[in-house]
Image: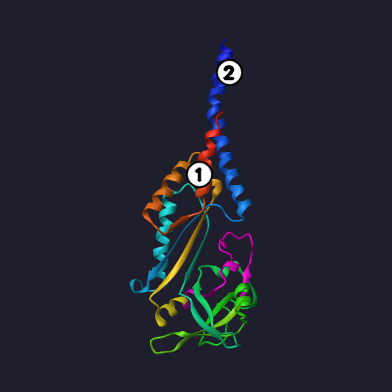
Amino acid sequence: LVLGMSFLVAVFGCQPMFKMGSLNMLINNSFVQEIEDKNQYPVVMGRSGSQNLSDVDGIDSVQNNVTSYQEVWEKYLSSIDVLATQTIYQFKEESCQGYYGSKGNYVNVSYMPEIENHIEILKGENFEEYVGAGEYYPCLISEAVMDEYNLSYGEVLKFVNWTSESGENLQLVVCGIFKEADRTDLFWYVEPTELSSNIFVSKESFDEIMKQYPQSSISYKHYSLFDYQDINSSNIEDVKYYIEEFKKADANFMFTFGEMIANYDAEKKTVNI
């Protein structure tokens, strides 16, 4: 009888562990299935917005504002590691003419922090290595932009409607053509092929353009990729709660795994060990 009672105690004592293990497997499988179905990283939080340039002093001020949102997410979801971030700052679309004949191309002059560390230069040089004409701001273009607008390495781009206060047109020179260095790099949540109207300048150039060729505002898109393997049955309710709070507090907040959470809520009811 004593042995029988001990066995029952052991069985019922293990029951919560078995259930927790089943829930963890359910969560992990949901994320893996999402990757397979959509070929995209599943746990991303982000924000898109614009910044009135009369309220800031250079790109550092804008970056600090964007980073403050990211820090809030990380503070309240401290049990989940951030694997990568991607941020794109851009001026509004403007028309430019290429000196080699391309005309009427509407492009976004953009800045992406750390882009230099995640690309392979196919032709030309990176920002720091370029020693071409000093009167132009060097820019990098992707293969997609090269094909879309028929642009070439070394081509000067003149923005016909974008001038300084003294009336000088903004001019950039294509210093390099690139592709992503590693197609599996989580940095490229939004891939170069999806940025087919963006041309990229260095932080220093972007900052100077902000001041010398002023526009009323710039826009940005930020993405933080959280480690889905850190989400489990012990913290998923906290994740759900804080996601709802972020949504209430910020109309520009976005996240990609709402459907997965809804499916988990429905399927966890079937886990009854």
Q: Residue at x 55, y 33 (%)?
A: 270
Point out residue 6 in the picture as x, y percentages from the top left corner. 56, 17
- SS state under label 1: helix
Point out residue 112 in the picture as x, y percentages from the top left corner. 51, 69
Q: Which residue is mark 1?
A: 262
Which callout, 2 or 1, points to the residue nearer the camera?
A: 1
- Spatial distance from mark 2 to mark 1, Cα to Cα? 37 Å
Point out residue 12 in the picture as x, y percentages from the top left corner. 54, 23
- SS state under label 2: helix
Q: Which residue is mark 2?
A: 7
Q: Is residue 56 magenta?
A: no
Q: Is residue 114 above or below residue 32?
A: below
Q: Amino acid at mark 1?
A: Ala
- Sequence-wise, the earlier of marks 2 and 1 is 2
Crowd around label 2: few <14 · some 14–19 · many ≥20 (10 Å): few
Quarter of the image where the N terminus is located: top right
Front-lying residue, 267 or 129: 267
Which quarter of the figure has residue 150? Answer: bottom right
